[in-house]
Image (cartoon, rainbow, N blue to C red):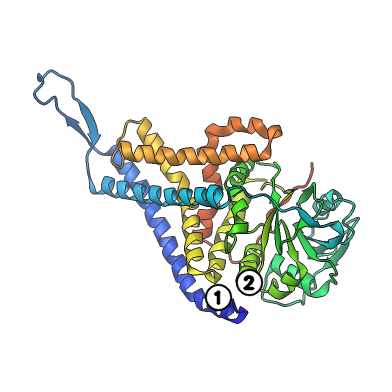
């Protein structure tokens, strides 16, 4: 796609995107209210007893159901709508992961450590950055730390982004754009790492224009936050299909390598809360680029508290929705549907299961219950896939499986916040480092 045309489409889509986001917020609030009010109305609605028919009058009643009212009917419609939305998203995930991504293997490395320049992005977390620098293999000898204020780091060159540097990008994207314009790079690739991205087993890169490193968050302060990231790792198995899609569905900037000529052609100079994903989306539309998922793993930090994970997911959700305006229509719709589905995904299980345990019939009985339980099994499967991804040393976390419904809430509440109240500025998730 011509860069000018892509830029014009992005600008022209902003107004439509803002209207769409308002519609999404109203819809999300309306559906949530319908579910809450309907659940309460269903719980306290009068019951209808089916009599014994031609049996003796002394026979016991054969069934007890909830009386049909406008509230319970609205409740049923809302539950079915959410179930179908989440079901469609789960089905799409399965097709992408197990059909499109079937048999994907990371290409063999064709570039060594001598072909990579490392740029570690931070504000001023010297101790956290030092751990990341210390984790790099000895063959990486061109290592730079890009900071917002002066810090002391051993084993890397530290650069401070000038206060007067001006571009369209903000915060991390602004720092990346400054580094792109300022630092001499004679390497084939630039490897971007977050300040907490401790690197494991990195020994080179395959021949692709954009190479996504895998992430494996490590536990910090909150067990629930860590469990939510285990769940997210199960969902992120879909990344193995991204090399076969015309545009990857997202990117993780905590560990991503970009061919230097593609970086210069695409630039980071765009305003976005998710600069990594926005960069990849722009690169795929403006240039003929290739993508690969690496075997190398970054042990980044899971958010240390429920507040931090909520704010992190809030930024991701809002940023993805805003950046989706630059995508082709089918990908924009998919991005928005997925965000809405993840926001609403815990509701069915959290409402249906308690009501069913109280013997309250909801949403047309057995068929809906079977559908909602099938989706509940999907959430359990994603959590278990995350445990398997982590490997044997973390197998005991499978004991937390009964907490999966709570974990999905932790994972989703930031998405809800991102849709309802998108942040205006980039916020860095708090890092704690080793203790």
Q: Secondary structure at mark 2?
A: loop
Where is residue 1 drawn, in percent x and y?
Answer: 59, 76
Label 2 to label 1, Cα distance in Å? 11 Å
Circle nearer the N terminus (2, 1): 1
Total marks shown come to 2
Between 343 and 386, the one nearer to me in the picture: 386
Q: Secondary structure at mark 1?
A: helix
Q: Could you say which disc has been placed on residue 10 in the image?
A: 1
Whether residue 223 appears in this view of the structure is no
Compared to 241, does 359 lie above or below? above
Q: Could you say which disc has been placed on residue 271 in the image?
A: 2
Identify the residue at image location x=72%, y=70%.
262
Label 1 crowd bin: few (<14), some (14–19), many (20+), radius 10 Å: some
Compared to 250, does 289 lie above or below? below
Pointers 2 and 1 in contact (C-beta within 8 Å)? no
Where is residue 97 drawn, in percent x and y?
Answer: 55, 49
């Amino acid at each position: 796609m011509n860069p000018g045309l892509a830029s014009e489409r992005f600008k022209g889509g902003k107004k439509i995107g803002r209207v769409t986001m308002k519609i999404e917020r109203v819809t999300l609030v309306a559906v949530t209210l319908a579910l809450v009010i309907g659940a309460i109305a269903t719980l306290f609605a009068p019951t209808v007893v089916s009599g014994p028919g031609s049996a003796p009058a002394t026979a016991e009643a054969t069934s007890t159901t909830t009386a049909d009212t406008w509230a319970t009917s609205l409740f049923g419609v809302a539950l079915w709508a959410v179930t179908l939305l989440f079901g469609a998203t789960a089905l799409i995930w399965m097709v992408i992961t197990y059909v499109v991504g079937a048999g994907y293997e990371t290409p063999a490395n064709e570039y060594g450590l001598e072909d990579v320049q490392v740029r570690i992005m931070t504000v001023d977390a010297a101790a956290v950055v030092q751990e990341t620098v210390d984790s790099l293999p000895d063959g990486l000898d061109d290592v730079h730390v890009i900071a917002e204020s002066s810090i002391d780091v051993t084993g890397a060159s530290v650069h401070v982004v000038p206060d007067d540097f001006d571009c369209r990008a903000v915060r991390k994207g602004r720092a990346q754009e400054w580094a792109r314009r300022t630092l001499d790079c004679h390497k084939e690739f630039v490897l971007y790492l977050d300040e907490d991205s401790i690197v494991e087993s990195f020994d080179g890169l395959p021949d692709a224009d954009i190479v996504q490193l895998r992430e494996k968050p490590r536990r910090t302060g909150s067990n629930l936050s860590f469990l939510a990231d285990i769940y997210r790792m199960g969902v992120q198995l879909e990344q193995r299909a991204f090399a076969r899609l015309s545009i990857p569905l997202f990117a993780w900037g905590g560990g991503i390598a970009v061919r230097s000529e593609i970086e210069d052609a695409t630039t980071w100079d765009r305003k976005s809360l998710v600069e990594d994903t926005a960069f990849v989306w722009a690169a795929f539309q403006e240039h003929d680029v290739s993508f690969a998922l690496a075997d190398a793993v970054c042990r980044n930090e899971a958010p240390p508290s429920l507040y931090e994970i909520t704010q992190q997911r809030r930024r991701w959700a809002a940023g993805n929705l805003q950046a989706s305006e630059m995508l082709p229509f089918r990908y924009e719709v998919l991005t928005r549907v997925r965000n809405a589905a993840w926001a609403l995904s815990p509701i069915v299980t959290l409402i249906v299961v308690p009501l069913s345990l109280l013997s309250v019939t909801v949403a047309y009985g057995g068929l809906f219950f079977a559908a909602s339980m099938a989706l509940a099994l999907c959430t359990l499967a994603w959590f278990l896939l995350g445990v398997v991804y982590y490997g044997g040393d973390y197998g005991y976390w499978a004991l937390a499986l009964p907490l999966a419904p709570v974990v999905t809430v932790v994972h989703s509440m930031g998405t809800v916040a991102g849709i309802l109240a998108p942040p205006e500025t980039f916020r860095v998730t708090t890092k704690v480092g080793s203790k």
